[in-house]
Image (cartoon, coloured by chain):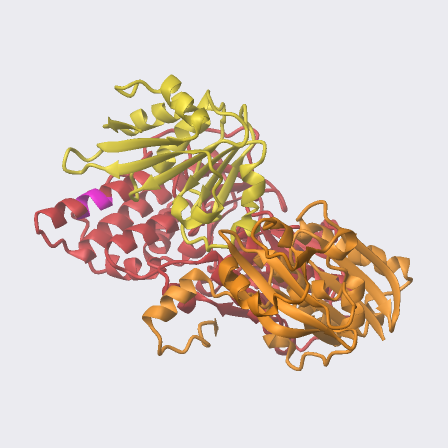
Chain colours: A yellow, B orange, C red
Amino acid sequence: MKTITVDTPEATMKLGRAIASHLKPADLILLDGDLGAGKTTFTKGLAAGLGIKRNVKSPTFTIIREYQDGRLPLYHMDAYRLDDGSGDELGLDEYFNGDGVNVVEWSKFVANELPDNYLRIVFKRNDDLEDNARTLTFDPHGNHFATILKESIDEDGK
Amino acid sequence: MKVLALDASNRPLSIAVLEDRQILATTTTTTHQKHAQFLLPIIDGLMKDCGLKPADLDRVVVAYGPGSYTGIRIATATAKVLAFTLGIQLVGVSSLQTLALNFTRERQLISPMFDARNQNLFAGLYRIKDGKPTVVIPDQHVELSRWLTKLASYKDESIIGVGDADHFPDQLPANFTMAENLNKLPQAANLGLFGQTLPAVQDIDSFVPNYLRLTKAEADWQKLHPEEDSSSYVEKV
Amino acid sequence: MKRNLMMAFESSCDETSVAIIENGAKILSNVVATQIKSHKRFGGVVPEVASRHHIEEITICIRDAMQEANVTYDDLDAVAVTYGPGLVGALLIGVTAAKMVAWAHQLPLIPVNHLAGHIYAARFVEPIEFPALALVVSGGHTELVYMPKEGEFQIIGETRDDAAGEAYDKVGRVMGINYPAGPTVDAMAAKGNDTFDFPRAMDKDANYDFSFSGLKSAFINTYHHAEQVGNKLNHDDLATSFQNAVVDVLVDKTLRALKNYPVKQLILAGGVAANNGLRTRLSAAIDQLPATQLIMAPRKLCGDNAAMIGAAGYVLFKEGHFAGLDLNADPSLEFDWAPDVIQ
């Protein structure tokens, strides 16, 4: 478990970028936490780190957006309002065992369909500090993600 | 009677074309779950192999659930719209009962089950009577442990487990035997034969998949609003 | 002259719709069954609930559309359907239904992009003249689409994060306004004053892109700060300030695009095209450009409906652009970017 406080969207993006270079196919990253706390911003950084040129837009409307133009494909999902049992409709299993990196926002909605290993990041707004202050807590499940975390982000979030 | 039968409830996809008791053509695949893409091309191919046109059909028989929400919805939408647009008969059969159709030994008990994750099942108990599976315990969405409790009173009889029964090899009691090979798979040919013996759906408009589960959103809502009528939420504008 | 009759299907989100369209231009029927009342209970569209409603409604919509148009299957020449973008499970009902009607009656099947449909809602006001530019604004999209000729769609600008309609829903949620928040915020905005001076993100940037995520955050920050110190903010003023920020950027970027892309027509389309603030401001702005005609989709056809799918599908029908029986829903379907965006 590692906690990092950032004060700009750029710093959030930088964290995404730092992790991207360590990712491999079928990796799963869960982004949970407050509305407007930087989940999509983090994903933009991660996409840039994968070499993806296209805009990473909010996946809310279609639930899933696919980006194929990077080192690995990126599958960005917003599970908000997904029903238990809807995973097959999206083909969640196929994504989680597939060829790309999976980023899932609001993961509690698909809690029953998650594999054992993933990196969970919880985003918190710290409005009492200042408007753009965010706390990101990294919680790796499995050795692969613990190693990634150790290698990509040091204690002061650089 | 010319019949089209289909089952897309889970990963296997099975389709058959029949004329009365004769099976004209059938296909079953287990290679992928892209049923939306493959279902109609397979139907079209089988029909052409039989020299039939869509308008020649008299009846559609569909395994309409329970199962994967998408799978049963694609199959049900296909059958429902086809029956509606051609003005032909429509029959829905339980997707669990469809698996029980693979067995014919008189008085045999069969427990078809679909894995609904986290130790939950869609399951029913059937007994072969006059060659056909009849309901002993109705289809339900149930925890595995509860289901096994319900089956305890049949512990002196052998029960055939079919469907995803082999997902729980260490948890099923000793009187279970697992279906093997072709008997593990839904067979639309059996579905088409059985479906000819059933009455057709009266009101095609209201024919929907047999989900056996409310959506979570709907269940939570009904808990908070027990008295509310939930039948009129869709409005024509 | 033969009248080409098309049956069109739309089910990409929370409306089940079937229409019968003549020659891509005349609506014989446009049946829309909306699920808004159902999803309102949950504060937004629940995908599984939407899929379930679609399959409940689909044959009723087909029957009503044919009866209202007074046609039989023998009269039909083609079947058109939205195959994306949208919710995959919702799209699949329309796609499956369209495939079965087409297959059963041996009719060509026409795959339509939902956004092309929104743009072609303008066809029911006037024939579209090219080149044209479309501003498509909805719950899932905010895009400037350049159309050099019929049937060609090129993105020259889009949202970098949230769609405009999505921003409306999210700030609406903060103010306690039920989904869909757009019409309510629009009505409140007409009563308030722009007192908060929210950011106009990317307004001065030399491109045609939009960003509403920063505006959303600024709104939420303002709201929460006030709450923390026990301040009650005027919701009408909040709505006006928010809407002005959205409309300013939409109009400014559209005008910038029109400068570099001189077109005969500007089309305003999508669910948010029904917004009064946007319609008024865009009309006033276009009055300054006599060479460009503004076509706003009729309010009734701004939301999702099958008539617009029939209009867009007719263009493909004339080109002989048909789908196979293996047509699948494509939830992430998008137009391509223009090969060279003129800045």
| Residue bounds of the magenta highlight | C219-223
Magenta stretch, main secondary structure, is helix
Q: Position of residue C294 (x, y in %)?
A: 45, 51
Vertical order, A101 against A110 (above or below): above
Q: Give C252 or C227, whichever is nearer the viewer.
A: C227
Q: How many marks?
A: 0
Q: Residue at x 14, y 53 (%)?
A: C233
Q: Residue at x 39, y 17 (%)?
A: A151
Q: Residue at x 63, y 68 (%)?
A: B125
Vertical order, C126 against A65 (above or below): below
* Quadrant, the N terminus of chain B: bottom right
Q: Give C141 or C250, whichever is nearer the viewer.
A: C141
Dividing the picture into quadrants, the one containing residue B74 is bottom right
Q: Is residue C50 visible?
A: no
Dividing the picture into quadrants, the one containing residue B221 is bottom left
As drawn, the residue found furthest toward the right would be B51
Residue B236 in the figure: left or right of residue C77? left
As drawn, the residue found furthest toward the front would be B156
Q: Position of residue B206 (x, y in %)?
A: 59, 76
Residue B28 in the figure: left or right of residue C255? right
